[in-house]
Amino acid sequence: MKIVFFGNSGGIQGSSGGNTSFAVHTGQSLVLVDSSGSPLENLAHSALNPELIDALLLTHSHIDHIYALPSLIHNLWLSGRSRTLAIHSNRETLAKASEIIDVFGLRQKKAMFPIELNECTDSSFEIKDLRITPFPVNHLVPATGFVFDDGSSRIACFADCNSSTPIPDAARSCSLMVHEAGIGGKPDHSSGREAGLAAKEAGALELLLVHLPQSPELRARILSDARSVFRNTGIPVLFKEIEI
Ligand SMILES: [Zn+2]
Ligand SMILES: [Zn+2]
C-alpha cells in the first residue's frame, strides 16, 4: 500500500505546503482523502492517473478539507469520466458536500458521471482490495478518521481531532498513523506531543504529522515535541510516494 501527500498544512496555505489532503493506493485501488488545492494538478505531480480514482473520503466539513470538491468533480467531468465517483463521509459532511456541488449545478452538467454519497457507519467497507474502517474523532464538527487495510499493512488516518479522541481497535498496532499536530493549546486540535502519545498508545510503528503551521521553526518544534514521546515520527514530503 502506498500513500502520497498533496499538502500537510493546517488551515493556512503557504510555501511549506497546501492544506492537508492525500491519496492511498495499491495499484488496484486509488482513494483520495479530503479535497483541497488543485486536485488533478496534485495527482499529476504524484504521477497518479485521475481516471483510476475509485472514491473520495471526506473527514469533515471544515473549508480546508472540502473546498476543492467542486473543482475535482468539474475536472473529472471535463476529462471525460463516466464511471461513478463514490464519496464517503459522515452525514453532516455529506450534506455540506452536496450543497457545494449544487452551488455550481454540477449534477446538471451534460453527461455528468454518477456521484454517489455514502454515509459512514461503524462498519468497514471495501473498495476493491482495500478494507476501510471509518471511526469518529473528537473535533469542533462531526469528523471521521479512516483505517486502510490492504491485508498486509494498515494505515490509520486521524482527521482534525483533539487529544480526547479514543483510539479505535482497527488502528491498534497499525503500520502508520497519520495525525494532525499543531502548536497546542487549541481545544479542538492536538499538539505534537499529543499526536506522539496517540501513536504510542496505539502501538503504531510510525507516525507522520500533518495539518501543521507554515513556520519551519514551529514545525521543527512540533516534530521535536512528538519525537520526545514517539521516536519514529516524521513530516511527509509532498508528492513523494511512501510505501507502507
Ligand atoms: Zn483543518
Ligand atoms: Zn477542522
Image (tube, grey):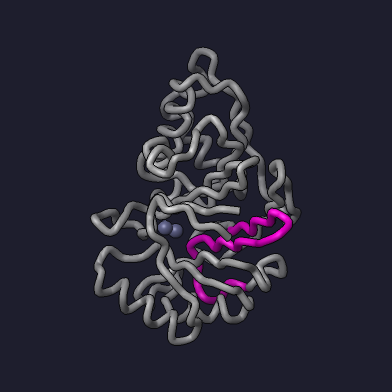
Front position in the image: 114 or 239: 239
Q: Is residue 161 found inside the magenta-colored segment of the image?
A: yes
**Residue placed at 37% from the left, 81% from the top?**
224
* 205 versus 47 height, above or below: below
Residue 49 in the image, given as x and y percentages of width and height:
50, 34
**Residue placed at 47% from the left, 30% from the top?**
73
**Residue placed at 71% from the left, 51% from the top?**
131
Residue 210 in the image, given as x and y percentages of width and height:
42, 63
Task: Quadrant for residue 184, please give it.
Answer: bottom left
Query: Is residue 177 toward the left or the right of residue 103 in the image?
Result: right
**Residue placed at 42% from the left, 29% from the top?**
103
Magenta span: 145-166
Q: Quadrant of ligand 2?
A: bottom left
* Quarter occupied by the C terminus: bottom right
Q: Is residue 172 visible?
A: yes
Q: Is residue 94 visible?
A: no
Residue 188 in the image, given as x and y percentages of width and height:
45, 69
How many tags in the picture? 0
Task: Quadrant for residue 17, please give it.
Answer: bottom left
Task: Quadrant for residue 138, please give it.
Answer: bottom right
Q: Is residue 97 found inside the magenta-colored segment of the image?
A: no
Residue situated furthest right in the rendering: 123
Residue situated furthest bottom in the rendering: 228
* 67 versus 139 height, above or below: above
Residue 79 in the image, given as x and y percentages of width and height:
46, 22
Front position in the image: 28 or 148: 28
* 163 versus 209 height, above or below: below
